[in-house]
Amino acid sequence: MKVERVQRWVMSALLTTVGFILAGGLCFLAAVADRPGARPGLLIIAAIVGTITLAGVRTINQLSILSAWLVLGLVPSAVGAWFLLLH
């Protein structure tokens, strides 16, 4: 395996981990927010962060940014919204 390929895998893993932790933190913050209008805004920001994270991963791997894989960036926000509806 070439060094450049391994570097791309490591950078992709780091970016995905950091981006989804940030998006998950925003969803958690939405769950504990006291202001009524803060919850949808934080969930939207979490969706944006997740989508940008996956766009960055695709850029690192030199793939087209526009893809169906960008929908996975909405997963943290969707899970957060689902927990908010249960709460």
Image (cartoon, rainbow, N blue to C red):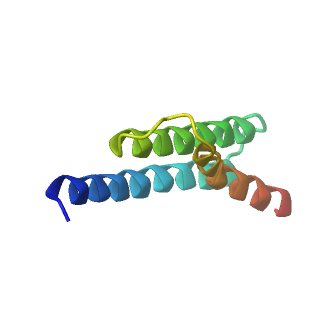
The C terminus appears in which quarter of the rendering? Answer: bottom right
Q: Quadrant of residue 24?
A: bottom right
Say left or right for 40 vs 69: right
Percent of width and height locating residue 8? 28, 52
61 or 81: which is nearer to us? 61
The quarter holding residue 84 reads: bottom right
Residue at 31 percent across and 58 percent down: it is 9
Q: Residue furthest front?
A: 1
Location of residue 15 in the rendering, given as x and y in whole percent from the top left corner = 37, 50
The residue positioned 58% from the left and 36% from the top of the image is: 48
The residue shown at (78%, 38%) is 36
Q: Residue at x 68, y 34 (%)?
A: 41
Left or right, residue 41 beside residue 58: right
Image coordinates of residue 82 in percent, x first then y, are 78, 58
Q: In the image shown, does 81 or 68 lie closer to the viewer?
A: 68
| Lateral position of residue 76 relative to residue 81, left or right | left
As drawn, is 66 to the left or to the right of 56? right
Q: Quadrant of the N terminus?
A: bottom left
Please name whichever residue, 15 or 23, is drawn nearer the observer in this view of the structure: 15
